Image: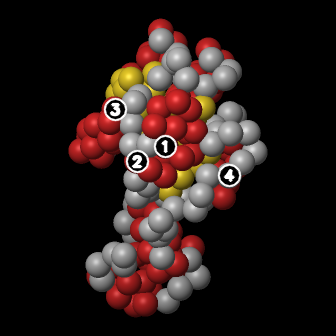
Amino acid sequence: MAANEIDELGEDKSLLLVDDDEPFLKRLAKAMEKRGFDVETSGSVAGGTAVATARPPAYAVIDLRLEDGNGLDVVEVLREKRPDSRIVVLTGYGAIATAVAAVKIGATDYLSKPADATDITNALLSKGDELPPPPENPMSADRVRWEHIQRVYELCDRNVSETARRLNMHRRTLQRILAKRSPR
């Protein structure tokens, strides 16, 4: 870790991580602790909201879709309790509408999974309108397409015919795509 990263954190190094993917949450917590943050974790909207209310952190990384609700609820509570906090919203299903909603209610940045600790740190520590550098390994166009198809498929309750109709795609083409592994 660079010495300037520690300096950029300032006095308050508190960081709230909210994600229901426990292995990812543990890895990210460990990586952020190594970068000098004082990490507190939660796996739910309820837990994240409780921490944001009781001990509003200077920094937060919040997953958009959690088992018990929407991560934007935690963002709203945190923004209310601590307006100066820097908040990054993470999601496995990047969409322009949710990115706009996240930024409108106070998120500092919006990153699609898989985001690594370096991307997240850069987003948390970026100043003002300065954009963080682009990620080292962004998702490929094929991966973004695959993620979108998977998202629509899940929203249609895994109904191939309905998903194909909504994506304006032939049903058999969709079945072939769903049968393949995800692209890198």
Question: Do the residues bearing badges 1 and 2 touch, measured as CB atoms within 8 Å?
Answer: yes
Q: Residues within 10 Å of mark 1 (few under 14, many from 20)?
A: some
Q: Amino acid at mark 3?
A: Glu
Question: How many discs mark residues in the rendered view?
Answer: 4
Q: Which residue is mark 2?
A: 117
N-terminal of the two: label 2 or label 3? 3
Side of 26 relative to 87 (left or right): left
Give the secondary structure at mark 2: helix
Q: Amino acid at mark 2?
A: Ala
Q: Which residue is mark 4?
A: 131
Q: CA distance from mark 2 to mark 3?
A: 10 Å
Instruction: Please report the residue visible at 69 percent of the width from the left and 34 percent of the height from the top.
Output: 105
Q: CA distance from mark 1 to mark 2?
A: 6 Å
Q: CA distance from mark 4 to mark 2?
A: 17 Å
Q: Which residue is mark 1?
A: 121
Q: Residues within 10 Å of mark 4 (few under 14, many from 20)?
A: few
Q: Residues within 10 Å of mark 2 (few under 14, many from 20)?
A: some
Instruction: Please report the residue visible at 40 percent of the width from the left and 53 percent of the height from the top.
Output: 116
| Numbered badge on residue 52 | none
N-terminal of the two: label 4 or label 3? 3
Q: Residues within 10 Å of mark 3 (few under 14, many from 20)?
A: some
In depth, the one of 138 and 105 nearer the eye is 138
Residue 63, position as x, y percentages in the image: 46, 42
Give the secondary structure at mark 3: helix
In depth, the one of 84 and 172 nearer the eye is 84
N-terminal of the two: label 4 or label 2? 2
Residue 126, position as x, y percentages in the image: 63, 42
Q: CA distance from mark 4 to mark 1?
A: 12 Å
Residue at far top of view: 54
